[in-house]
Amino acid sequence: GAGVSQSPSNKVTEKGKDVELRCDPISGHTALYWYRQSLGQGLEFLIYFQGNSAPDKSGLPSDRFSAERTGGSVSTLTIQRTQQEDSAVYLCASSQLAGGYTDTQYFGPGTRLTVL
Amino acid sequence: AQSVTQLDSQVPVFEEAPVELRCNYSSSVSVYLFWYVQYPNQGLQLLLKYLSGSTLVKGINGFEAEFNKSQTSFHLRKPSVHISDTAEYFCAVSDIRNAGNMLTFGGGTRLMVKP
């Protein structure tokens, strides 16, 4: 079956511009996560959505970062006024709830963001 | 809060040799433990996970890991590596109290298998 897909695969933008990154989770997965992979910071959790509950935004590095999930499926991560330190690979993952525990997270291929 | 340390950033090894990738974690609460592999230009793929039960966990591609609670370690092993195992390996933990299961990752270990 189809896995997690992300678009675009690569994004180059200028400092100060806004960008939107998209994630299509596996069909039927209720949980969706965003992570960031950068040279200086490794892999970091950003935000988590579960069903219709309020998202856990505890990993967002600043208020320039926001995310939404429409209809419990597709998610968009928005970075406003991008800075060079935002350059990273942004990974999306999805999983199912199983017995109150969210099961294995399946990762997409990522979006490589470069801020010039 | 949890933290994960992967002591070796790179591990070179010859094909068919055994390999161990080390992972230590720090946490004030009980955790679940995971190993993920990332092949070049691909996303992360789960190799194995420890939730409870037997401390020796077997995963895909012939990998296994052993949970050692007293040493807070979860080292990954393979008795005989192949060229195709060349990739980056990430150890991760999550707080068992948190149903969201957000992962805290180590810095990664690049396994380089040489012919």
Image (spheres, coloured by chain):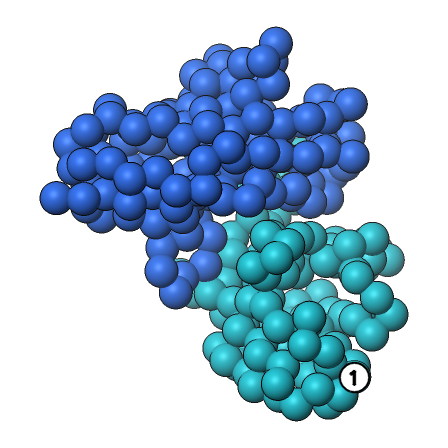
Q: Chain A is drawn in which colour?
A: cyan
Quarter of the figure that contains the C terminus of chain A: bottom right
Q: Residue at x 55, y 44 (%)?
A: B107
**Would residue B105 be found to the left or right of residue B85 on screen?**
right
Residues packed near mark 1 inside 10 Å, few (<14), some (14 to 19) or many (20 plus): some
Vertical placement of residue B60 versus A9, above or below:
above
- Between A33 and A16, the one lying in front of the other is A16
Of the chain colours in the picture, the one used for chain B is blue
Seen as rendered, the residue at the extreme left is B115
Q: In which quarter of the image is residue B56?
A: top left
Q: What is the tally of numbered marks visible in this picture?
A: 1
Whether residue A69 is situated above or below residue A81 in the rendered picture: above
- Kindly identify the amino acid type of the residue bearing the numbered disc 1: Arg
Subunit of mark 1?
A: A
Q: In which quarter of the image is residue A50?
A: bottom right
Residue assigned mark 1? A81
- Residue A76 spot, x, y in % from top left: 69, 75
